[in-house]
Image (cartoon, helix red, strand yellow):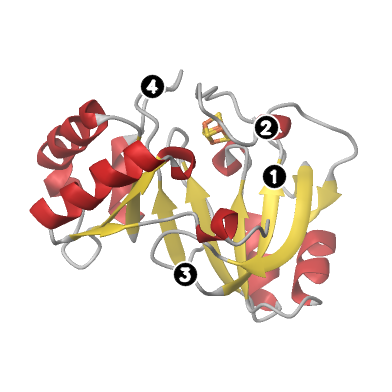
Amino acid sequence: RGRLSEYAINRIYPTVQGEGRMAGTAMTIVRLQSCPVACLWCDTPESWALPEPWQAAAVVAAQVAGLPPRWALVTGGEPCWHALGMLTVELQARGMKTALETSGVYRITGSWDWVTISPKPDGRLPLIEHNLYCADEVKWIVGRQRDLERLEAFLLATSALRPPGRRAISIQPVSTQAKATALCLEAVMRHPEWRLSLQTHKLIGIA
Ligand code: SF4
């Protein structure tokens, strides 16, 4: 697993978050390298391998804090493969809010203002269910009807692990596919407590 205060960086860039409950918020994406989860439909396979050199937490945080957004979104790859404590300390010391997007297959470390867990039921590693205690949002990717049935079963099985007030469910059609979008629209009608999450950054052609 990762190092204590250095990080393998894929890319750092400012953008407007396109999906999930934080959509529309200016955020600087800190995309970390490495992901052993190996989802079939991964849209960032370039983030799987580990590059050199690694960058110190303070160097990463200074770069992020120098950009306009006041939120840093740490993602991957699978960011929790890294030990994230020092990175979040350095970011928050510079006045940044910290958001995490993870598949939840490693224990979440660090200090977070917002946590999104996007479980990958077909991935190689199982979800650590106790991570759900600190999830502000569960984002579920939907490609076919079976994915919605799996979500219903997942929510039933994990309701005790998701504290009241931290039960936001976002369902997101895989790769903005039309058939998946239609499934999600029907599902939100049946479950008005869920929210439709669209990858609006893809719809408007930004990263
Ligand atoms: Fe790709 Fe994310 Fe799955 Fe890793 S967890 S393989 S980065 S979709």
Q: Nearer the viewer, mark 2 or mark 4?
A: 4
Find out if the beta carbon at label 3 lies less than 8 Å from the nearest ligand 1 atom: no
- Which residue is the extreme one toward the right? 53
Q: Quadrant of residue 34?
A: top right
Where is residue 80? Give x, y as percent.
55, 41
Where is residue 167? Give x, y as percent.
22, 59
**What label does residue 113 carry, if any?**
3
Nearer the observer, 88 or 148: 148
**Badge 4 amino acid:** Asp
Do the CB atoms of the residues marked 4 and 1 lie less than 8 Å apart? no
Please indicate whether residue 143 sits to the left or right of residue 125 in the image: left
Give whichever of discs 3 and 1 has the lower sequence position: 1
Q: Nearer the viewer, mark 3 or mark 1?
A: 1
Nearer the observer, 29 or 90: 29
Please indicate whether residue 35 sits to the left or right of residue 24 in the image: right
Identify the secondary structure beneath mark 3: loop
Give whichever of discs 4 and 1 has the lower sequence position: 1
Distance in Å between CA atoms under marks 4 and 3: 28 Å
Do the CB atoms of the residues marked 1 and 2 lie less than 8 Å apart? yes
- Residue at the spot 76% in from the left edge and 66% down from the top edge: 61
Find out if the beta carbon at label 1 lies less than 8 Å from the nearest ligand 1 atom: no
Q: Nearer the viewer, mark 4 or mark 1?
A: 4
- Which residue is the extreme one toward the front? 178
Q: In which of the image's four quarters is ligand 1 placed?
A: top right
Please indicate whether residue 143 sits to the left or right of residue 111 in the image: left
Identify the secondary structure beneath mark 1: strand
**What label does residue 32 carry, if any?**
1
